[in-house]
Image (cartoon, grey):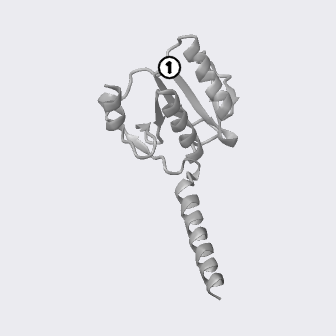
C-alpha cells in the first residue's frame, strides 16, 4: 500500500515539474517581444537594409532598393545577412516596414528581433503613425542594448 502512494506522489511531482518546465521554455513564437519607442535623436538617418513584411511570415528583401524584392523565409534572410557580413557590406541597422499588401505581424517582429540579437545589429520597425521603434529581445531595453555596445 505504501509503495503505491509514494509512487503516485512521485508521479504527481514529476508531472508538475515537467509542466512547469514546458511552460517556462515556451517562447511563444516571438509574442514576448515588443517594440520599444526610440527617441528621435536615436533614430539613424539612413538604414543599411530595408525589409518589407510579406505574406506567410516572409520578408521582401531588395538590396538594390528597387521595387522587385525577393520574398525570403527566415533562413533565407539569415543567409542574406550572413552574405552581407562576409562581403563587409554595411549591416548595422535594419528597418522593417509594412508592405502594400501585408501588415507587420508579431511573427515578423519576433523573427527579426531574434536574428538581430544573434547577428549583433539593430533592428527597427516603422509603425502606422510614422514613428520608429527599435526591436529589442525580451528582458532587454533599448538603453541596456546601447550600454552593452559602449
The image shows a total of numbered marks equal to 1
* Residue 146, x across and y down, in percent: 33, 31
Write down the residue under mark 1.
91
Q: Secondary structure at mark 1?
A: loop
Is 20 in front, or is 40?
20
Residue 129 lies in quadrant: top left
Q: Considering only vertical position in the picture, is 24 above or below 44? A: below
Q: Residue furthest bottom?
A: 1
- CA neighbours of label 1 inside 10 A, class few (<14), some (14 to 19), many (20+): some
Q: Quadrant of the N terminus?
A: bottom right
Q: Residue furthest top?
A: 87
Q: Is residue 93 left or right of residue 101?
A: left
* Residue 7, x across and y down, in percent: 63, 77
Q: Is residue 90 left or right of residue 76?
A: left
Residue at x 33%, y 37% (from the top left corner) = 144
* Residue 16, x across and y down, in percent: 56, 70
Residue at x 61%, y 69% (from the top left corner) = 15
Q: Quadrant of the C terminus?
A: top left
* Residue 95, x across and y down, in percent: 50, 29
Residue at x 56%, y 72% (from the top left corner) = 13
Residue 64 lies in quadrant: top right
Amino acid at each position: 500500500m505504501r509503495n503505491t502512494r509514494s509512487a503516485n506522489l512521485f508521479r504527481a511531482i514529476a508531472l508538475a515539474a515537467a509542466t512547469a518546465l514546458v511552460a517556462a521554455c515556451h517562447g511563444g513564437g516571438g509574442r514576448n517581444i515588443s517594440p520599444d519607442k526610440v527617441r528621435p535623436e536615436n533614430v539613424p538617418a539612413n538604414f543599411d537594409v530595408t525589409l518589407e513584411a510579406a505574406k506567410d511570415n516572409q520578408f521582401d528583401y531588395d538590396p538594390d532598393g528597387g521595387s522587385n524584392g525577393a520574398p525570403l523565409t527566415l533562413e533565407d534572410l539569415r543567409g542574406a545577412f550572413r552574405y552581407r557580413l562576409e562581403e563587409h557590406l554595411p549591416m548595422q541597422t535594419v528597418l522593417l516596414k509594412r508592405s502594400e499588401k501585408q501588415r507587420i505581424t508579431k511573427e515578423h517582429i519576433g523573427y527579426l528581433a531574434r536574428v538581430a540579437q544573434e547577428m549583433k545589429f539593430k533592428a527597427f520597425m516603422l509603425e502606422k503613425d510614422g514613428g520608429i521603434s527599435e526591436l529589442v529581445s525580451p528582458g532587454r531595453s533599448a538603453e541596456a542594448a546601447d550600454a552593452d555596445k559602449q
